[in-house]
Image: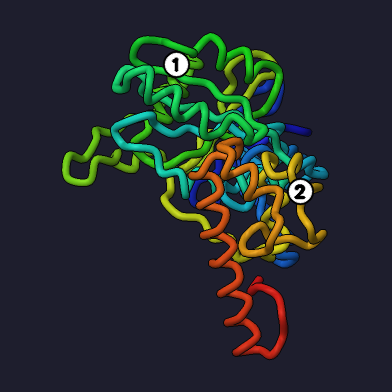
Amino acid sequence: MQGKIIKGIAGFYYVDVPALGVYECKAKGIFRKDNIKPLVGDDVRIEITDPKDCEGNIIEILPRRSALIRPAVANIDQALLIFAVAKPEPNFNLLDRFLIMMRRQGLDCILCFNKTDFADRAACDRISEIYAGSGCSILLTSAVTGEGIGELKEALAAKTTAVAGPSGVGKSSIVNCLQEKIQMETGAISKKIDRGKHTTRHSELIAISDGTYIMDTPGFSSLSLFDMTKEELRDCYPEFAPYEAECRFLTCSHIHEPDCGVRNALEANIIHRIRYDNYTAFYKELDSAERTAVKYTGKRGNRR
């Protein structure tokens, strides 16, 4: 029979079979042999080994529409990136790394800035201004007051959405606001580091309503960009595209070349400085990685 993996813990996969319930399953050894790991969100075929205790084995993973490495989820339609307006202050470098990862996977992104109850309107407007050209929908929310929760539910309707973001931003609180069946554990903010205690331990698919699912995923603090080249980076910044035709060189990196349309837009305050500064930092990071790869392997290209 066919179902969907809604949770995976310590080698066990919990498969939701319509009208029959959830079965605790192990993956057949053939998957390990072929180096294939089932992911939360996978549509699978299972065989029942114990009908009474609802146990079985996964015997086939059906073709995936999409897959992310981190968070490790499959068959999602979009990503919801949750950061806080304040407490903690948003880490724009990390946020842009998230956006690059999602864009390279071809996923649309919703940017949710939570904890508006801790910030004034000027802070909220500033964040909206920074990401106005990013190609993402921007929502300002408060899990405490309920601000923006209705809009968020509309944005998630009839889709499967991966929820990601660092610890301490109210991610689990937002998930709890969206549905009532599964209440995620929320952690107190550490006063010493102004971040949340890491409470979400595994990826889990949660039904908000019929046909609408969210995948809550563990918080984390860093993302490597070493699976791409520096030339690919500019394609991850949609706000650059309208001005690249004004660059003198077709291969303009937007870093040091003369007559650069992107840098002209930057100086005219059309492209936000924070977004551009992150771009240049990532470009240098990727360039350094490529140079290191050439030094040790004699071949160009990033480490894979």
Q: Position of residue 63 (x, y in %)?
A: 82, 44
The residue type indicated by label 1 comes to Cys
Q: Which residue does the numbered mark 1 point to in the structure image?
A: 177
Q: Is residue 205 above or below residue 150?
A: below
Mark 2 crowd level (few <14, some 14–19, many ≥20, 10 Å Cα): many
Q: Which residue does the numbered mark 2 point to in the structure image?
A: 244
Q: Position of residue 51 (x, y in %)?
A: 64, 32
The residue type indicated by label 2 comes to Glu
Corner quadrant of residue 153: top right
Q: Are marks 1 and 2 in contact (CB under 8 Å)?
A: no
Corner quadrant of residue 299: bottom right
What is the number of callouts on the image?
2
Q: Nearer the viewer, residue 40 or 286?
A: 286
Q: Quadrant of the C terminus?
A: bottom right
Q: Residue at x 65, y 41 (%)?
A: 56
Q: Nearer the viewer, residue 68 or 241?
A: 241
Q: Position of residue 293 (x, y in %)?
A: 62, 82
Any part of residue 46 in sight: no
Q: Is residue 64 left or right of residue 304?
A: right
Q: Is residue 281 above or below residue 245?
A: below
Q: Nearer the viewer, residue 80 or 281?
A: 281
Q: Which numbered dot is residue 188? A: none
Task: Name which of mark 1 and mark 2 comes first in the sequence.
Answer: 1
Mark 1 crowd level (few <14, some 14–19, many ≥20, 10 Å Cα): some
Mark 1: secondary structure: helix
Q: Nearer the viewer, residue 8 or 102?
A: 102
Q: Is residue 12 left or right of residue 32?
A: left
Q: Residue at x 70, y 75 (%)?
A: 301
Q: Nearer the viewer, mark 1 or mark 2?
A: 2
Q: Position of residue 96 (x, y in %)?
A: 54, 46
Residue at the outermost left position: 192
Q: Residue at x 68, y 63 (%)?
A: 257
